[in-house]
Amino acid sequence: MSRKFWILGLCLVLLLLAFFLWPETPGEIAPPEPPVQGTAPPPD
């Protein structure tokens, strides 16, 4: 594998990482709301 492909692959990986780990708005990736306790019926 030539060096050019290494650099291209590295750039692609970096771009993907930045795309997934760097949301433009922090509110985009919000943790799911925890279920409210007491709504589920008690087990028998």
Image: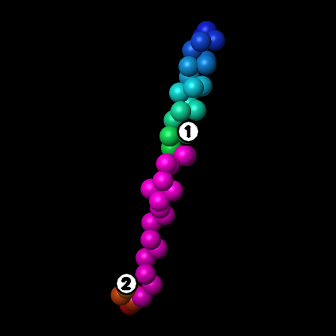
What range of the chain is rendered magenta?
21-38
SS class of the residue under badge 1?
A: helix
Q: Is residue 19 left or right of residue 44?
A: right
SS class of the residue under badge 2?
A: loop
Residue 2 in picture, x, y percent from top left:
61, 9
At label 2, the amino acid type is Ala
Residue at position x 61%, y 18% in the image: 6
> Which of the numbered marks, if any, corresponds to residue 43?
none
Q: Is residue 37 above or below residue 2?
A: below
Q: Is residue 7 left or right of residue 16?
A: right
Q: Quadrant of the N terminus?
A: top right
Badge count = 2
Q: Is residue 17 above or below residue 25?
A: above
At label 1, the amino acid type is Leu
Q: Quadrant of the C terminus?
A: bottom left
- Mark 1 — residue? 17
Residue 10 in picture, x, y percent from top left:
60, 25
Q: Is residue 44 left or right of residue 18?
A: left
Residue 18 in picture, x, y percent from top left:
55, 39
Residue 14 in picture, x, y percent from top left:
58, 32
Residue at position x 59%, y 12% in the image: 4
Q: Residue furthest top?
A: 2
Residue at position x 61%, y 19% in the image: 7
State the residue in front, 41 or 6.
6
Among the 4 quarters of the image, the one containing residue 33: bottom left
State the residue in front, 12 or 26.
26
Q: Residues within 10 Å of mark 1 (few under 14, many from 20)?
A: few
Residue at position x 57%, y 26% in the image: 11
Magenta span includes 34: yes
- Mark 2 — residue? 40
